[in-house]
Amino acid sequence: MNKPYRPRRQSGVVLIIGLVFLMLMTVIGVAAIQSSTTQERMAGNAGDRAEVFQSAENALLEGEDAVIDNDCGSLTSLLDELPDADVDGSNWTNATSVDATFESAYVLTRIPARLEDDESEAAEETETCGGFYYVSAKAESDKGMTVVLRSTVFKRY
């Protein structure tokens, strides 16, 4: 006669090992999600920076065009103080706005002649408003997280 089947006493080791593996898989999954979220944010910020940089470049070109295209009277009315990049932005209040999407603007500042024999001094004596101009451009993202400042020295003959 066969003895009836009696299950042996189980200690539950498989259950504990299964729970440990499940916990490890959960930790790995959460770390992967956090990593991909961080990478997505970094890519978004890089794209935002590139767009704001292009807007600042556009403002810089608009400023250079203003130096070229305006007559002396109009050009003189566009001149302002050289903005300080370390100030909170209040010194950009008189800037000429270019693009409302990224709040880009430029400021024109005339650089005075330094030497008597400097060719810019001779150009300043004529009605051409010739000489050197400092063109500063600033663009800011709509969220205010990215700000790009660009500048150049431009010569008008």
Image: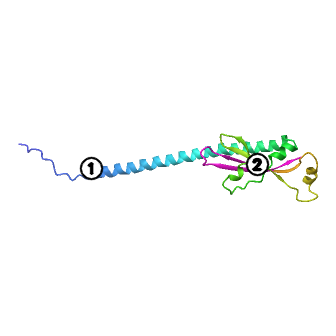
Which is nearer the N-term, disc 1 or disc 2?
A: 1
Magenta residues?
Answer: 134-157
Q: Nearer the viewer, residue 75 or 136?
A: 75
Q: Position of residue 19 (x, y in %)?
A: 31, 50
Give the residue pinned by disc 1.
15
The residue that label 2 is drawn on is 107
**Residue 117 falls left or right of residue 3:** right
Which of the pair 146/6 is nearer the observer? 146
Residue at the far bottom in the pictured view: 115
Q: Is residue 67 left or right of residue 40?
A: right
How far is disc 1 from disc 2 in space, using C-alphas? Answer: 71 Å
Q: Which element type, helix, strand or loop, lies under badge 1?
A: helix
Main SS category, magenta section: strand
Give the crowd class for mark 1: few <14, some 14-19, many >=20 residues within 10 Å.
few
Residue placed most toward the observer, 73 or 116: 73
Q: Amino acid at mark 2?
A: Val
Residue 149 is one of the magenta-drawn residues: yes
- Give yes or no for residue 88 being in the magenta stretch: no
